[in-house]
Image (cartoon, rainbow, N blue to C red):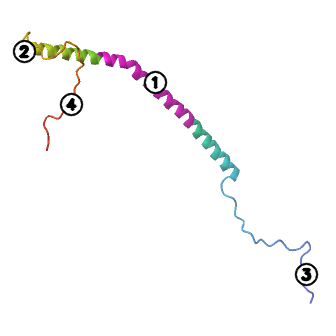
């Protein structure tokens, strides 16, 4: 009997590796995408910080410009209280009695105290 010989050209290669197709994009695509995403985030962060600084500056300037108005309102309230106190003193004590030692104006201070002490 003749011996079996390989076919002419040889046998096919034996496939011993798994033939699993690669899923998804190549790694460089993910790397570029991540960097683009981060660049966009840093861009928004940069302009967001700039916007916050601008709003803080505007807030400070707004407070500085409204301060004279608030001070004038406070002064008018103090004058109203002062003249109301003088009228009340005039009504209670008459024109002869002075309750202060000098005629110098002392800006009144108001301290808030509780209505009644809790023990």
What kind of element bears circle 1? helix
In the rendered structure, does residue 35 fall within the stretch colored magenta? no
Name the quadrant containing residue 75: top left
Q: Earlier in the sequence, mark 2 or mark 4?
A: 2
The residue pinned by badge 4 equals 112
Q: Nearer the viewer, mark 2 or mark 4?
A: 2
Calculate the distance from the C-alpha at mark 1 to the C-alpha at mark 4.
33 Å
How crowded is the residue under tag 3: few (<14 C-alpha within 10 Å), some, or many (20+)? few
The residue pinned by badge 3 equals 5
> What kind of secondary structure does the magenta stretch mostly adopt?
helix
The residue pinned by badge 2 equals 93
Q: Nearer the viewer, mark 3 or mark 4?
A: 4
Coordinates of residue 45 in the picture (x, y in percent)? 55, 37
Q: Earlier in the sequence, mark 1 or mark 4?
A: 1
Residue at the outermost front position: 101
Q: Nearer the viewer, mark 1 or mark 3?
A: 1
Q: Residue at x 64, y 42 (%)?
A: 36
Coordinates of residue 43 in the picture (x, y in percent)? 59, 36
On the rendered image, what quadrant is the N terminus found in? bottom right
Calculate the distance from the C-alpha at mark 2 to the C-alpha at mark 4.
26 Å
Q: From the viewer's side, name the closer residue of 96 and 52.
A: 96
Q: From the viewer's side, name the closer residue of 50 and 15.
A: 50
How crowded is the residue under tag 4: few (<14 C-alpha within 10 Å), some, or many (20+)? few
Q: Residue at x 19, y 16 (%)?
A: 82
The residue segment tinted magenta is 44-72
Q: Residue at x 15, y 15 (%)?
A: 84
Q: Nearer the viewer, mark 2 or mark 1?
A: 2
Coordinates of residue 98 in the picture (x, y in percent)? 12, 14
């Amino acid at each position: 009997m003749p011996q079996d010989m390989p076919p002419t050209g040889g046998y096919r290669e034996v496939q011993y590796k798994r033939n699993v197709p690669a899923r998804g994009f190549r790694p460089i695509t993910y790397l570029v995408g991540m960097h683009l995403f981060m660049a966009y985030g840093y861009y928004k962060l940069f302009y967001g910080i700039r916007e916050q600084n601008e709003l803080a500056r505007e807030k400070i300037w707004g407070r500085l410009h409204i301060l004279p108005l608030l001070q004038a309102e406070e002064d008018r309230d103090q004058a109203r209280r002062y003249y109301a106190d003088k009228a009340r003193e005039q009504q209670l004590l008459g024109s002869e009695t002075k309750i202060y030692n000098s005629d110098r104006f002392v800006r009144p201070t108001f301290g808030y105290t509780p209505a009644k002490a809790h023990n």
